Image (spheres, rainbow, N blue to C red):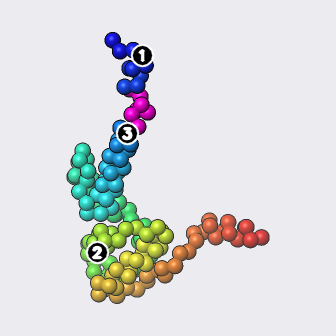
Amino acid sequence: MPAADERRNRSDPAADPAGVAAARSRLAEAQTRLLAALVGDAEPPPGFDPERVRVQAGALVGKRREVVAKVAPALVDDLVDRVGRQRFVELFAEYTRAHPRPAEGARADAAAFAEYLRGNGLPTRGAPPSGHRKGGLARLVTRWRRR
C-alpha cells in the first residue's frame, strides 16, 4: 500500500504542474471554440450537442437584434416597412455572422448594421450616429460630479 504522501501527490493537481497547464489549455481551447460556435459559424467543440448550440446561437442573435431595435427603432421600422419582418431577421443574421458585437455597445452595433445595409444597397433612414453616447444614469453621475 502506498504511503500517505504518495497517495496525496497522485490526487493533488498541484503535484503535476504540467498536467494542470495542459488541462487549462484544453479548457481554454474548448471555451474559445464554443464561443466561436455561439457567435459565428464555427463548429462546436467535441462533447457539445450541435443542435443545442445552434439553438442557443440563434437566441443570442435574436437578443442582439431586439437590443438594436430598441436603440434604433426608426432604422428597424423603416427597414421592416420596406423589406418585411422576415427579410429584416435574415439580414440581421447575415450581418451578425460577419460582424462581432462592437465593444462600444448597442448604439454602435445599430450604426454598424446601418452601414452594412448601405453597403449592400439598402439605403437606411433613422440610423443612429456611430458616436458613443452615455446612458441616462451615466449622464446624471457626470453632471453630479461636475458640481
Q: What residue sits 35% from the left and 15% below the top? A: 2
Residue at 56% over, 74% down: 133
Crowd rating for badge 1 (residues with CA inside 10 Å; few <14, some 14–19, many 20+): few
Q: Nearer the viewer, residue 60 or 29?
A: 29
Dot 2, how many residues are within 10 Å of its Cα: few (below 14), some (14-19), or many (20+)? Answer: some
Residue 53 placement (x, y as % from top left):
27, 53
**In the rendering, which numbered label is found on residue 18?**
3
- The amino acid type found where label 3 is placed reads Ala
The numbered dot on residue 88 is none
Q: Is residue 8 visible?
A: yes
Q: Indicate the quadrant where residue 15 lies.
A: top left
Query: Label 1 belongs to which residue?
Result: 4
Amino acid at the residue labelled 1: Ala
Point out residue 91 in the picture as x, y percentages from the top left corner: 28, 74
Q: Position of residue 21 (x, y in %)?
A: 38, 42
What residue range appears in magenta?
Answer: 11-18
Q: Give the mark, 1 or 2, whose residue is nearer the N terminus.
A: 1
Q: Nearer the viewer, mark 2 or mark 3?
A: 3
Q: Where is residue 123 in the image (x, y as percent from the top left)?
A: 34, 88
Spatial separation of the CA atoms under disc 2 and disc 3:
47 Å
Placement of 19 over or under 143, stated as above or below: above
Q: Circle 2 is placed at which residue position?
A: 91
Task: State whether residue 74 appears in this view.
Answer: no
Q: Earlier in the sequence, mark 2 or mark 3?
A: 3
Residue 17 magenta-drawn? Answer: yes
Label 1 residue SS: helix
Disc 3 on helix, strand or loop?
helix
Which quadrant of the view contains residue 39? bottom left
